[in-house]
Image (spheres, helix red, strand yellow):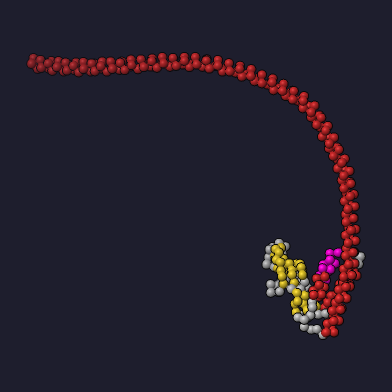
Amino acid sequence: MKITTTLLFAFVSLSVFSQSVDTLKSIKALETKLKSLNAELTNRIETVSKVTQLNASLIDSLQKQTVVNSNEIAGANRQLGIKISNTESSINQKIQTLDNSLSKSTLYWVIAFLATVLLSGVVYFLLGKRIKTGKSDVEEQISKTKKVLEEEGIKLDTKLTEVLETQLKIVQAERNTAAASNTEEADHSLALKVADEIMRINKNLSNMDANTKGLKQLGASVKRIEDNFAANGYEMPELLNKPFDKRDKMIANMVEDDNLEKGKEMITKIIKPQVNFRGIMIQAAQVEVSVGTK
C-alpha cells in the first residue's frame, strides 16, 4: 500500500514538474515576443516622431513662403494699379484733345460735304436737263438726216434701176438680132452686175420704213427689172432661210448658232446671189450658213 502511494506521489510530482517546465518555457517565449513587439513599437514611434517633425518644418517653411508671395503680389498689384491709373489719365487726356480737334474739323468737313452735294445736285439737274434736251435734239436730227439719206438713196437707186433696165433692153435687142443662144458665147457681165444690184436694193428695201418717200416707186422699178431679167433668160433662185445642202455648188461660210436646233443648217445670209442662165448656173452663190448647236 505504501509502495503504491509512493509511486502515485512520484508520478504526480513528475507530472507537476513537467507542467512547470512547459509553463516556464511558454513564459520565456512570451517575454521574448513581448520584447520584440516593444522594440518594433519603439521604432515606429521614433519614425512617426521624425515624420511629424519634418512635416512641421515643411509646413512652417510653406507658411513663410506664402507670406513672402502674398507681400510680393500685393506690391505688384499696387504698382500695376498706379500704372493703369496713369495710363487711363493719359488716354483720357489724349481722347479729349482729339475729340476737340475732330469736333471742329468734322463740322468743317460736314459743311463742305453738304455744300458739294448741293452743288453737284444743282449741276446734275441742269446738265441732265441740258443733256436730255440735247439728246432729243440729236436723235431728232439723226432721224431727219437718216430719212433724208434714205430718200436720196432711193432716188439714186431708182435712177440706177432705170439705167439697168435700159441696158437690159439693149442687150436683149442685140441678142435677138444676133440670135445668140450659146451660153459660152454670151456676155453675162451686165446680168451679173444687175443681179448684185437687185439683191442689194431688195435688202435695203426690207430695212426701210414703209412710209419712206419714194419707196413704193423704187419697189416697182426693181420689180420691172426682175421681170426683164427673167425675160432675158436669167434666174436668181431664192436661197435665204432655205436648208443648206452640201451637194449644192456654192461658197458657204459656216457659223455656229445657239438658237438653232443641233445638226440643222440654214442659209441665213446671201453675200453673192446664184445666177442661172437658161437653166445653167453662171454664178455660184456665196452664202453664210448657220449651224445649230442647241
Query: Where 41 falls versus 222 (above or below)?
Result: above
What range is drawn magenta here? Answer: 198-210
On the picture, is 146 further left or further right than 285?
A: right
Name the quadrant containing residue 224. Answer: bottom right
Name the quadrant containing residue 108. Answer: top right
Q: Residue at x 70, y 68 (%)?
A: 264
Name the quadrant containing residue 111. Answer: top right
Q: Residue at x 61, y 19 (%)?
A: 80
On the picture, is 268 further left or further right than 170?
A: left
Q: Which sits in the foreground, 98 or 79?
A: 98
Report the quarter where the N terminus lies: top left
Query: Where 143 falls versus 200 (above or below)?
Result: above
- The answer to whether any part of residue 99 appears in the image is yes
Whole-percent x and y of residue 185? 77, 81
On the picture, is 229 further left or further right than 36?
A: right
Q: Which sits in the foreground, 31 or 105?
A: 105
Task: Indicate whether residue 74 is drawn in magenta.
Answer: no
* Main SS of residues in magenta: helix
Q: Which sits in the foreground, 119 or 32?
A: 119
Report the quarter where the C terminus lies: bottom right
Whole-percent x and y of residue 23? 21, 17
Query: Where 272 falls versus 107 (above or below)?
Result: below
Whole-percent x and y of residue 167? 86, 76
Q: Residue at x 61, y 17 (%)?
A: 79
- The answer to whether any part of residue 206 appears in the image is no
Numbered marks: total: 0
